[in-house]
Image (cartoon, rainbow, N blue to C red):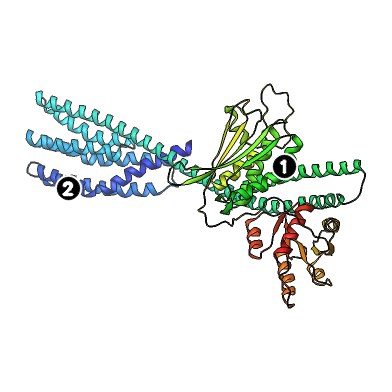
């Protein structure tokens, strides 16, 4: 607080000093006019002496105030007192002109009074910020002038004297009002400066927080990439080994245990996929890649993958989609959205319930084009309207009031993932539901212009395939996962070659029919480098087709997907089971 008052006093002094320097020519001109008025009636030495005193005092005061305003080493209180003394000096010099009225006629007295009163009134703007200085200067102008009229006597003298004193009071009030306005203005300016400083500090803090968030986001992305790979490695080995066990003769109770383990692995994989999907979508590392998609083929693949789950719960699963209908969207994101919606519908539908997926064209809201509406309808307990927004939040699972059914199995992330992916694709998702009436999720997709019967998405019903007698090279640096590949592929009737490094793979005797390569290999070698080297070795031998290679990865980075596309490498996402691996290898061999 004292520092703020000192700054205010410094500003008061600065204003008075600036005005003192700026009024040089006005004071000079006014002094000349006064000298001209009194020249005939007042002795010349008196006039010249007065004139010299006025000009000299004005110049000395202006110079002194300028020095004091700049001299912050000297206490401000002492400088303000000096300002009052300088105003006493200049007020006395200027106000002494009132003594000339004793030798003038009433007309010239009136003119001189107007000049002196104007000088006093001008002090409101030049000295009011230091109120004692104003009173010292203006008082020495108004008081002698009023006194000369009062001494003259008569009604005119008394009347004019009273008016001069009254005008002095009015000017004093104006000066106080001016001082109040100045102080309020200074306070507002100080508050604005403090606010600006605070905002600048907050802006700097926000910039630091933003940089920290960017670094944290990058660290999170790197962690997710590593965690996605490391967490899926044991799942990969377990899934392949469970697949190999299916081909081993065993007792019925042992086979039942294998099925339980397989089901548990599927649930663990689904939960891991959901958690990593949420993290990657929030981290912004997933980028939509729209393309032309055959919606009927994509829907057939999704429905086929949920057939067993629906049968196990006694839920009917039906799809209705026109053949050849195409949309423009990211096929992987749409498949995962649809899979989450269908999975959610199956879980919340009772036994003997029905899940229906329908695809229809409809007119877009702007009526300028058509779009495709995809609906997923279940026969579950329904969702109250006030909870429609809530179900799209993470880890939220609702149960109908009064329902005795056990809560549906799940992790409460499916619809949260749907919401994030819908925002990423720009696809509106609408929920229509009420208690006891099931739930219907509607997606609106942009319709693609038909260009032919061939579509962008494969994935129809499972086609027959076999790897019996095929030679497959497995390039995997993790011995646990590599062993699981050997078990699973051996159970499919393959002759399996294995390698932990690229050099080992290149040193294998014989030519494999296909290669399984992990995207991440030890020693700073990527799966893409390995695939290029292996194919280069094959191309050096005449009459050999392009080597079929299937890449397995836990990374969904768009750069990895794009690199696989450029090298024409089928990309499987970990954990891959034996059936998915077998289908991919068979398709790669057939297409080579």
Q: Quadrant of the C terminus?
A: bottom right
* Residue at left offset 73%, top offset 44%: 270
Q: Is residue 520 left or right of residue 197?
A: right
Identify the mark nearer the N-term, 2 or 1.
2
Q: Position of residue 95 (x, y in %)?
A: 21, 38
Q: Is residue 412 visible in this depiction of the protein?
A: no
* Residue at left offset 67%, top offset 48%: 301
Q: Secondary structure at mark 1?
A: helix
Residue bearing the label numbered 1: 307
Q: Between marks 2 and 1, how big is the CA–CA gap?
A: 105 Å
Q: Position of residue 480 (x, y in %)?
A: 85, 56
Which residue is more in the foreground, 58 or 420?
A: 420
Q: Is residue 397 left or right of residue 81?
A: right
Q: Is residue 135 visible in this depiction of the protein?
A: yes
Query: In this rendering, is residue 122 above or below 48?
Result: above
Q: Secondary structure at mark 2?
A: helix
Task: Classify mark 2: residues with Cα within 10 Å, few (<14), some (14-19) or many (20+).
Answer: few
**Residue depth check, mark 2 versus mark 1: number of the one nearer the observer:** 1
Residue bearing the label numbered 2: 29
* Residue at left offset 68%, top offset 44%: 303
Which residue is more in the foreground, 345 or 95?
A: 345
Q: Is residue 175 left or right of residue 550?
A: left
Query: In this rendering, is residue 293 above or below 275?
Result: below
Q: Position of residue 573 (x, y in %)?
A: 71, 53
Task: Classify mark 1: residues with Cα within 10 Å, few (<14), some (14-19) or many (20+).
Answer: some
Q: Position of residue 67 (x, y in %)?
A: 36, 49
Q: Is residue 20 left or right of residue 165?
A: right
* Residue at left offset 75%, top offset 46%: 269
Tell me the number on the disc at residue 344: none
Residue farthest to the right, as pictured: 251
Which residue is more in the foreground, 198 or 296?
A: 296
């Amino acid at each position: 607080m004292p520092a703020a008052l000192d700054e205010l006093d410094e500003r008061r002094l600065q204003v008075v000093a600036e005005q003192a320097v700026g009024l040089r020519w006005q004071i000079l001109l006014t002094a000349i006019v006064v000298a001209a008025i009194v020249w005939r009636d007042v002795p010349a030495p008196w006039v010249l002496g007065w004139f010299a005193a006025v000009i000299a005092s004005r110049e000395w005061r202006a110079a002194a105030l300028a020095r004091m305003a700049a001299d912050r080493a000297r206490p401000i209180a002492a400088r303000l007192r000096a300002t009052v003394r300088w105003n006493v000096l200049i007020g006395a010099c200027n106000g002494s002109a009132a003594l000339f009225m004793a030798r003038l006629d009433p007309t010239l007295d009136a003119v001189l009074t107007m000049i002196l009163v104007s000088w006093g009134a001008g002090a409101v703007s030049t000295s009011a910020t230091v109120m004692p200085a104003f009173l010292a200067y203006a008082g020495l102008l108004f008081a002698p002038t009023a006194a000369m009229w009062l001494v003259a006597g008569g009604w005119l003298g008394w009347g004019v004297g009273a008016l001069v004193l009254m005008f002095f009071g009015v000017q004093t009030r104006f000066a106080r009002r001016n001082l109040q306005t100045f102080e309020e203005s200074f306070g507002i300016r100080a508050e604005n400066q403090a606010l600006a400083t605070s905002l600048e500090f907050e802006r700097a803090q926000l910039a630091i927080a933003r940089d920290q968030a960017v670094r944290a986001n990058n660290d999170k992305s790197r962690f997710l990439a590593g965690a996605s790979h490391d967490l899926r490695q044991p799942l990969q080995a377990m899934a392949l080994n469970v697949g190999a066990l299916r081909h081993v003769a065993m007792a019925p109770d042992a086979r039942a245990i294998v099925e339980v383990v397989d089901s548990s692995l599927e649930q663990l994989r689904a939960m891991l996929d959901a958690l990593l999907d949420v993290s990657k979508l929030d981290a912004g590392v997933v980028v939509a890649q729209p393309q032309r998609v055959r919606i009927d083929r994509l829907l057939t693949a999704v429905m086929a993958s949920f057939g067993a789950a629906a049968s196990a719960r006694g839920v009917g699963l039906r799809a209705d989609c026109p053949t050849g209908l195409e949309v423009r969207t990211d096929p992987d994101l749409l498949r995962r959205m649809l899979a989450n919606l269908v999975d959610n519908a199956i879980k919340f539908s009772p036994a003997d319930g029905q899940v229906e997926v329908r695809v229809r064209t409809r007119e877009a809201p702007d009526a300028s084009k058509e779009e495709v509406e995809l609906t997923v309808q279940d026969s579950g307990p329904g969702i109250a309207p006030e909870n429609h927004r809530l179900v799209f939040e993470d880890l939220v699972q609702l149960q109908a009031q009064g329902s005795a059914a056990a809560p549906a199995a799940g992790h409460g992330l499916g619809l949260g993932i749907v919401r994030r992916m819908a925002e990423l694709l720009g696809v509106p998702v609408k929920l229509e539901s009420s208690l006891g009436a099931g739930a219907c999720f509607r997606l609106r997709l942009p319709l693609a212009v038909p260009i032919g019967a061939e579509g962008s998405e494969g994935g129809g019903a499972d086609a027959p395939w076999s790897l019996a007698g095929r030679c497959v090279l497995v390039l995997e640096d993790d011995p646990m996962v590599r062993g699981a590949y050997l078990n699973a592929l051996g159970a499919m009737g393959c002759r399996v070659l294995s390698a932990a490094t690229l050099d080992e793979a290149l040193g294998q005797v014989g030519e494999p029919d296909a290669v399984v390569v992990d995207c991440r290999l030890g020693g700073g070698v990527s799966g893409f480098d390995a695939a290029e080297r292996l194919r280069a070795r094959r191309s050096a031998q005449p009459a050999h087709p392009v080597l079929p290679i299937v890449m397995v990865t836990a990374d969904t980075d768009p750069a990895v997907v794009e690199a696989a596309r450029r090298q024409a490498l089928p990309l499987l996402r970990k954990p891959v089971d034996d059936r998915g691996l077998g289908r991919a290898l068979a398709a790669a061999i057939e297409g080579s």
